[in-house]
Amino acid sequence: MPVAGISELIYMNGSSQGRLWQLFILTNRRYKWFEKWIFEMHYNITVNAGNMSKRNLLIASTSTVFEKPYLAYLTEELEQFYNDVDNIIFFPFARPGGISYDDYTALVSSFFSSLDKKVTGIHESDNMPETVNECDGIFAGGGNTFVLLNALYRYNLMDPLRKRVLAGIPYLGTSAGSNILGVSIQTTNDMPVVYPPSFAALAVVPFNMNPHYTDPDPDSKHMGETRETRIKEFLVFNDVPVAGLREGSYFIVSGNNMRLGGNHSVRIFERSKEPYEINPGSDVSFLLNEKE
Ligand code: ASP
């Protein structure tokens, strides 16, 4: 499990007194044991806690596939997925390429208007945690995962978001928006352009994502690390399975069941195991089982 710690706890509580404590702890490294203790306590209470049987998630590798408009490849799934939702709350925080929240929300809105759904950007709310508490459906868009997670901690949205997701409202994530559903964001492809209080993510599934997963090209002359090498490095330090989701692949989670959608297989990486492939359309519910 990721070493998060008191910063996570404090941002979830969001008090200014908490922030002072955070400074104190972070500047006094000999209190590391205390941080660990708090994290373990917090981990049991918050991260592990919760009934997962109502989860309703669409975890997509990407928003856009080659030569198709934004979200178009998911249209049929989304019609069904958001069947009972009229107003979708959109999280634009990952803002790919620095697009403004308003422009990003407008893009999403124009896709969903074709499905007769209204889209409202969470940034327009005067009380974001309250808006999350009351909403019926969520979409977190892609972009930079560090920027997205940082915003969730700073606006005190981690806790309400997790509770809402566990309550069963439909949550669609694309790419960065999918990464934050895992245990941590340590297997994103993004650069850490900002420093979130923790890498710990929502942990509503017990594995990590690597979206836009690409296979090594046997004819390539490029000598940098492959995606597979980087994921194996992660597994040296973390016993958390990683799903390499190729473009156009997605998981549909309904309670304790999960299916692989799209046309590609998914590559699963686990500690001390050879990576393996699972065919499109398969039942992949076993990935939802918590490790003992
Ligand atoms: N930058 C990606 C996105 O489109 C996330 C990732 O590659 O990890 O959201």
Image (cartoon, rainbow, N blue to C red):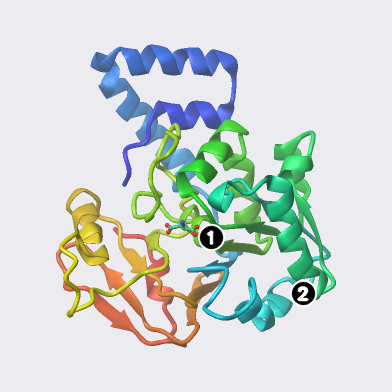
Q: From the image, tell me which residue sits under label 1.
A: 52
Spatial CA span between label 2 and label 1:
21 Å
Q: Is residue 32 left or right of residue 161?
A: left
x, y percentage for residue 34?
32, 21
Query: 8 above or below 1?
Result: above
Mark carried by residue 65:
none
The answer to whether the beta carbon of the residue marked 2 is less than 8 Å from any atom of ligand 1 is: no
Q: Are marks 2 and 1 in contact (CB under 8 Å)?
A: no
Q: Mark 2 is on which residue type? A: Asn
Q: Nearer the viewer, residue 98 or 255?
A: 98
Q: Is residue 92 left or right of residue 219?
A: right
| Local SS, label 2 | loop
Q: Residue at 19% across / 74% down in the picture? A: 220
Badge 2 crowding class, 10 Å Cα cut-off, few under 14, some 14 to 19, many 20 or more, is: few
* Number of numbered callouts drawn: 2
x, y percentage for residue 215?
28, 75
Q: Residue at 26% across / 68% down in the picture? A: 269
Look at the image and tell me in which quarter the C terminus lies: bottom left
Question: Residue 133's quadrant in the figure?
Answer: top right
Camera-nearest label, 2 or 1: 2
Q: From the image, tell me which residue sits under label 2.
A: 83
Q: Nearer the viewer, residue 21 or 44?
A: 21
**Outermost residue toward the front in this view:** 221
Q: Is residue 129 left or right of residue 57?
A: right
Badge 1 crowding class, 10 Å Cα cut-off, few under 14, some 14 to 19, many 20 or more, is: some
Query: 139 above or below 3?
Result: below
x, y percentage for residue 142?
55, 57
Q: Mark 1 is on which residue type? A: Met
| Local SS, label 1 | loop
x, y percentage for residue 283?
44, 83
Sequence-first tag of 2 and 1: 1
